Amino acid sequence: MLTSATLTTSGLTPSGLKPSAHFLGKAGANSAGNLSGILTPSHEGPLDERLAGTSHLELRVNRQHGIPWAYAHRPNAKGVVCIFPVIQHEGKRSLLFLLSARPPLNRPPTLGKLNIECPAGLAGDEHPEESMAEAAARELKEETGVSLSHHKLQLLADNVTASAGLTSESKSYFLADNVSLPAKHTPVGDGRVIIDRLLVPISRLEKDLSGWLQEQYKANRVISSDTLAGLSLVLAQEKYRKAHPVKHRLTQWVRGFRQWITQLLERVFSVFKTKSA
């Protein structure tokens, strides 16, 4: 939890960040801008308040239990989508990861390390009308070049909290099975942090995931917690697929049939809406 000892106005108001009027009123008398007036156990002030932020990211404080708790909040986003593409590569089912150079990692203990992550992004932040699955399909296309209808994405887990003590953000995990990977692709909308792609045979991860993680760390790489969590879901899915091949194929057929019905109904509704207009 952030405390008044660690939060000051100078740390909250770089270019583009604007503290709220209530925050200025509390801290205005202090030239150092210390947040002691805000982050002190008290029932005074709004129950949940915006301290600073931009149009896409806010620093807020919540006083629900009488003790102020500072946290990050994305006011426009519905959540985060994480996608795990499975690709046939050199005769093996392989997972596609991305290697990125994220600015927050450019300090100890992760200084100079690349981040292993899955294709991911925000849902609803810039496209308020899209569903989580639609956002997942868009992010998959933008970051990897893989084109796939959102109907063909399999939801692995939903409403997974990212870091409950730090942010209000939640995540949804999707599987994109048996997709084709373009030979080359330039990521779009990634902030220029994605620098390469990494294909790893699922059999290698099933054999010794801990060993593989140690190899990556020695190669100056770290892995994001959401990628590791989603990876465990994918490996569990693979284990079920191998243990129950008939049930798995039946499940896939039923899912495909539902997707076909959904797409058909969407087309019919679209035609009806056009004619009505």
Image: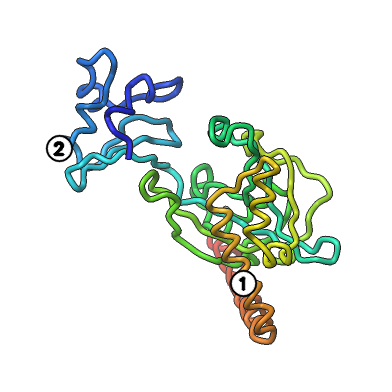
Give the residue furthest to the left.
43
Quarter assignment of residue 91 = bottom right
Give the residue furthest to the top.
31
Give the secondary structure at mark 2: loop
Binning the other alpha carbons within 10 Å of mark 1 as few (below 14), some (14 to 19) or many (20 upward) gives some
In the picture provided, is 25 more to the left or to the right than 108? left
Q: Which residue matches tag 2?
A: 42
| Dot 2 and dot 1 residues touching (CB under 8 Å) | no
Residue 197 position within the rendered picture, expressed as x and y whole percent measured from the top left: 74, 47
Residue 12 position within the rendered picture, expressed as x and y whole percent measured from the top left: 37, 25
Residue type pointed to by label 2: Ser
In the rendered image, the vertical position of residue 183 relative to residue 250, given as above or below: above
In the picture provided, is 24 more to the left or to the right than 111? left
Residue type pointed to by label 1: Gln
* Residue name at image x 68 percent, y 87 percent: 246
Binning the other alpha carbons within 10 Å of mark 2 as few (below 14), some (14 to 19) or many (20 upward) gives few
Quarter assignment of residue 53 = top left
* Residue name at image x 49 percent, y 44 percent: 125
Give the secondary structure at mark 1: helix
* Residue name at image x 71 percent, y 64 percent: 202
Residue 94 position within the rendered picture, expressed as x and y whole percent measured from the top left: 74, 61
| In the foreground, 20 or 242 | 242
Q: Does residue 274 appear in this view?
A: no
Q: Does residue 128 appear in this view?
A: yes
| In the foreground, 48 or 105 | 105
Give whichever of discs 2 and 1 has the lower sequence position: 2
Quadrant of image for the C terminus: bottom right
Quarter assignment of residue 86 = bottom right
Quadrant of image for the N terminus: top left
In the picture provided, is 245 more to the left or to the right than 166? right
Q: Which residue matches tag 1?
A: 237
